[in-house]
Amino acid sequence: MKKTLVFLLTLALAVTASAMVISAASPAVSPEREGIIGSAATAVDGNGDSYNITVITPSDVDESDFEDALEDLQETEKNDNLNIVDIAEVIITGTGDPSFPITVSFNVSGISSSDHNYILFRKSDGSIITIKPSSLANGVMKAEFPELGAFALVSDKGAAAKPGESKPGATSPKTGAQTAGVALLAMISALAIGYSAKKIFE
């Protein structure tokens, strides 16, 4: 009888620990990216058709890809306070073949319409073009893109955050904290079962 109880307690520990580890290790289905630009976005093409798109942090583009274009923009606008505040990429998450150009609306934070805001868009041929957002109201920026791809958001807002650092496969601080919590719970469970088993044999 005692052996049976110990076996059941051990089995319960194994199942519980496995479930907790799997739960903590599983990534979120649609994690919110870091940075000024949010993940939510909508798009309407030249024919008036809507498309499901999302904003991600590109893995193959960084500030260095926009340095020359930023310097040209600073010189053209005579504004040395212009800086890259975020880098993102828009992609279609559903099906469809949009007619370009396409009007994209995406969430932003930390900047306003009173700031001088621009978009440096990297086309598929590698060239960089400057786009002036058509509007920015209630935290939503709207701009016309020649295609879908990576872009840098430029602003002279001094309080603007730096570019988001979300990278594919990276472990977020929240995930790290969850993993540590799981390890602690597993250890406590093991000690509790060990103590119970000891009591059974006494």
Image (spheres, grey):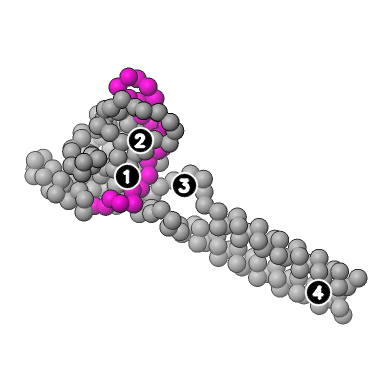
* Number of marks drawn: 4
Question: Are circles 4 and 2 on residues that touch, CB within 8 Å?
Answer: no
Label 1 neighbour load within 10 Å: few <14, some 14-19, many 20+: many
Residue 93 drawn above or below residue 103: below
- Contact (CB < 8 A) between labels 3 and 1? no
In terms of secondary structure, where does tag 3 sit?
loop
Image position of 1 with respect to 130: above or below: below
Q: Are marks 1 and 4 in contact (CB under 8 Å)?
A: no
Rendered image quadrant of residue 198 = bottom right
Q: Is residue 27 left or right of residue 200?
A: left
Q: Amino acid at mark 2?
A: Phe
Q: Position of residue 14 (x, y in %)?
A: 71, 65
As helix, strand or loop, the secondary structure at mark 1 comes to strand
C-alpha span from label 3 to label 1: 14 Å
- What's under tag 3, amino acid-wise? Pro
Q: Mark 2 or mark 3, which is nearer the start of the sequence?
A: 3
Residue 197: which disc?
4
Quick check: marks 3 and 2 in contact, CB under 8 Å? no
- Which residue is drawn at the image coordinates 84% and 76% (left, top)? 199
Residue 88: which numbered mark, if any?
Answer: 1
Q: Could you tell me which residue is drawn at 28 percent across and 37 percent down?
A: 112
Which is nearer the N-term, disc 1 or disc 2?
Answer: 1
Identify the mark at residue 31; answer none if there is no mark. 3
Which residue was labeled with disc 2?
106
